[in-house]
Image (cartoon, rainbow, N blue to C red):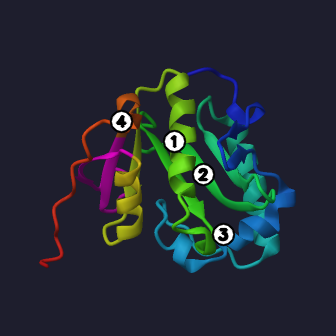
Amino acid sequence: MSTSTWTTHPLTTERLTLRPWSVDDAQAALDVYGHAEVTRWLSPDMDRVPDLPSMRLLLQQWSAEDARLPAPAGRWAVQRNTDDHVIGGAVLLPLPPGNDDLEIGWQLRPDTWGEGYATETTHALARWAFSQNVHEIFAVVRPGNARAAATVRNNGMHWVGETTKYFGVELQVFRLRAADLDLAAPTALQPPDLSGD
């Protein structure tokens, strides 16, 4: 990985632009991270952001952390091209404990769920990571988060198991390789149904 950060290179898709966060995005970010239904599923644990000053501070922290991350790692604001509204956030971040694995993730405003933005975001970040000599990326999903598990499978990610390796909590792990972005590839392996249904 290079020593420069990705932040000089926004990523653009048909409907979205992924760009660096700015403190000026605090209200739009609060519209995402101020929702308990978004933050309750995040790993590591993240409480709902309670107010605008707290969101500004968090954006400043993220910016400082991103400046130290090697490409392709970082955090993006997800902006809709039709109206330039920030509708979410996305990450490519090293996973603890060894920072050897790279996590892909997204957090979208609840009113935008089901529109395909998560898939578009995932594919943009994955293409960026794979262009930077990353060979695989991972999504970690808390058991019970059926929406996220379905989304990562729809994105071509393959379930590889469950672990407490990351963040010390039980997580389902999904992997994506460059070949998995091929829509003609076989469908992803499903995790076992542990619900008893």
Q: Earlier in the sequence, mark 1 or mark 2?
A: 2
* Above or below, comparing residue 12 to residue 33 in the picture: above
Q: Is residue 167 visible?
A: no
Residue at point 55%, 48% (across, down) = 120
Q: Residues under labels 4 and 1: Cα distance?
A: 10 Å
Q: Earlier in the sequence, mark 3 or mark 4?
A: 3
Numbered badge on residue 90 = 2
Numbered badge on residue 180 = 4
Crowd band around label 1 with a 10 angstrom C-alpha radius: few (<14), some (14–19), many (20+):
some
Q: Is 42 left or right of 169, judged from the image as shown?
A: right
Q: Earlier in the sequence, mark 3 or mark 1?
A: 3
Look at the numbered discs 3 and 1 and tell me whether their residues touch, using CB distance below 8 Å: no
The residue labelled by disc 3 is 32
Residue at point 41%, 48% (across, down) = 155
Q: Which residues are magenta?
A: 156-175
Residue at point 38%, 34% (across, down) = 182
Q: How many marks?
A: 4
- Residue 136 pos. (x, y %): 39, 32
Q: Residues under labels 4 and 2: Cα distance?
A: 20 Å
Q: Quadrant location of the N terminus?
A: top right
- Amino acid type, mark 2: Ala
